[in-house]
Amino acid sequence: MTEIELCILANYPILYVVSPEESRFTDELERICRRHRRKLWVHTISTGLFRIAVAHRNQPRRERQTGEVHGQLTDPIALLEHMKQSKPDEGIFLLLDIQAVLRDPLVQRLLKDVARHFKLSHNNVVILSPSHDLPRTLEQEIYLVDFKLPSNEDLTGTLESVLSTLKQRSVKIHLSAADRERLVTAGQGLVMEEFENCLARGVVKSRGIIDHRMIDEMVASKKQIIKKTGILDFFDSRENMDHIGGLDNLKAWLAKRQLAFTAKARAYGLPHPKGILLLGIQGCGKSLTAKACAALWQFPLLRLDTGRLFSDRVGGSEDKTRQAIRTAEALAPCILWIDEIEKSMAGIGSSSHADAGTAARVFASIATWLQEKAVPVFVIATANTVTSLPPELIRKGRWDEIFFLDLPGLGERQSIIGIHLAKRRQDPHIFDIAGLAEKCAGFSGAEIEQAIIDGLYNAFDEDRSLTTDDIRQSFDITVPLSITMAENVQALRTWALSRTRLASNDKLEEERRQWRSGTIRTV
C-alpha cells in the first residue's frame, strides 16, 4: 500500500492492482483517502458508481454510510464517458469489474482519454483485478501493482480478534503461544476472508473447544486453491515418519528443521530451509518421505506434475511455470514435491532443436527459482538416476542437502517388515521377522511390501492366517531389482558414495559397508 499511496500522491492517473481481495483492498484504500482527505468512489456493474463515506479511524466497516449513487452508470463505457467529464480533485475511482471488458478497443481508447484528463485534474483510477490480464496497448498508460496477501501481522491481528470474541462467549480455548504461531503460519496463502471462514468452520467443527486441531483445518482449506490451478495436486498425506523403516539420518535431519519456519528461527538468524534432493534406487522410500515430511511439519503437500507445464500455445509453458511457482509461494509455508525430476529434465540439451528451447526455458525458470526463492516453500525432488540431471541442478545452493537412499540394511528390513505387517492388521510379534529380514537381503522397501501382500493373497485364498512361511515363499520367487538391474544399481551406489549424504545410519551394519565397497553382490 505504500507503493500505491506514493503513486497516488505522484498523480499517476491509472493504477492496475492485482488481488482477489476486494474488501481488504477497499479498507486499505479508504485509509489512504482518510489520510489525504480524498473522496473515494467505487464502481460495480451491478450498482453503478457510488461514493463511500470514508469511515473514521477504527470505525467498523459495517457502520459506513454510502453517499451519492449514480445507478445509471452500470455500463463501463457510460462510466468512462462520465469520468472524462469529472471535475478536478473529484477523488479516487476504484473500478472492480472493468477488467472483463479491457479487451474492447473502445474501452481502451476511453481509458487513454481518462488518463490524460486525470493527469490534469489530479484524480486517480484504480482498477482491481484478481489476475494480471493487461492489454499491451494500455501498458504505457497504466502502473501495475501487486497487492500482497495478508502478512503474518495481519493474520495474527485477525486471529487474536476472533479468539477474544470467542472467549467472551465462553468458548474454551486451548492454544499455546506456539500453537497460535503455527496456526497463523498455516493460514499464510489464504486471503483474509478465507482465513476468517476457516476459523469459523473450525469453531463449529470443534463444538466449542479451540485447540491445535485448527491447524489441520487451515491446511485443508488450501485444497480449493490448488484445485483451481490445474497444474499442482494437493496430497492428503496419511503417512508419517513411523511408517518409514530406517532412513535415520534423513528423519533426524527433517526433525531438526520442523521449527525452522517459525518467527523464533528468523530471530535466531536461521534462513528458511530450501529443500532436498532425494536420489536413490526405486522403491526405497523417496516419495514416502515427502508425504511423511508434510505430516511431520503439518504443511500442505503440493505435487508438481512437470508434464502439465508444457503447452501448445506460444509462451504458454513459461506462463504455466510462473503460475505454478506463484501458487506454491501463495500457499507458503508448504512442501512442493517434484517426483522423478530427471524425467522432466530429459532432453534439455537438445531442446533448442526439438521445441524451440521451451523445455530449456522452463528448466531455467525452475532452477533460478530454486536458487533465489526467499519464501518458505520447501522443495523435495526425487530422482532414480543422475545421468539425466543437468550438473547445475545438483550443485550446492539449489538444495540444502542431497541424500542417497540405498537398499535397506538388515535392521531396516526388520523395521519395514514389522511396519507392513502392522498396517495389514497382522501381529508382527508372531512372525520370525529376524529370519525374514535375512531372507530378503537386497530387496527394496517396495519389494518387501509386495512380497507380504502376495503372502496375504495366498493365505486369504486358502482361508487361513498369514504365516512366516507364506512371506518366505514370496521372497523365494521374487527377483529384486538389485539383481535384474545389478549394474545400474551398483553404478548409482558408486556415484553417490562420494557425492551425497547417506539417508540411513550405516555405521552399525557391516552388511551396508560391504555393499558400499562393492566387495559382495546384493543378493
Image: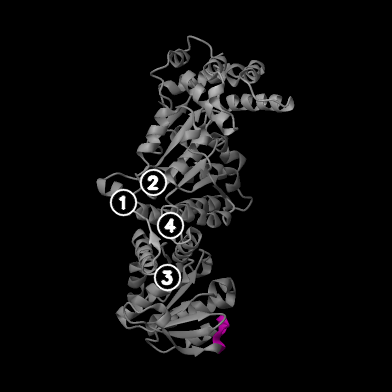
- Residue 226 at x, y = what percent? 54, 54
- Marks 4 and 3, how far apart at CA: 16 Å
**What SS does tag 1 mark?**
helix
- Residue holding disc 2: 372
Label for residue 24?
Answer: 3
Q: Residues within 10 Å of mark 3 (few under 14, many from 20)?
A: some
Q: Is residue 74 found inside the magenta-colored segment of the image?
A: yes
The residue segment tinted magenta is 72-78
Kindly identify the residue that appears in the image at 45 percent across and 68 percent down: 17
Tag 3: amino acid: Arg
Label for residue 263?
Answer: 1
Most foreground residue, 270 or 341: 270
**What SS does tag 3 mark?**
helix
What is the chief secondary structure element of the magenta stretch?
helix
Q: Residues within 10 Å of mark 2 (few under 14, many from 20)?
A: few
Tag 4: amino acid: Gly
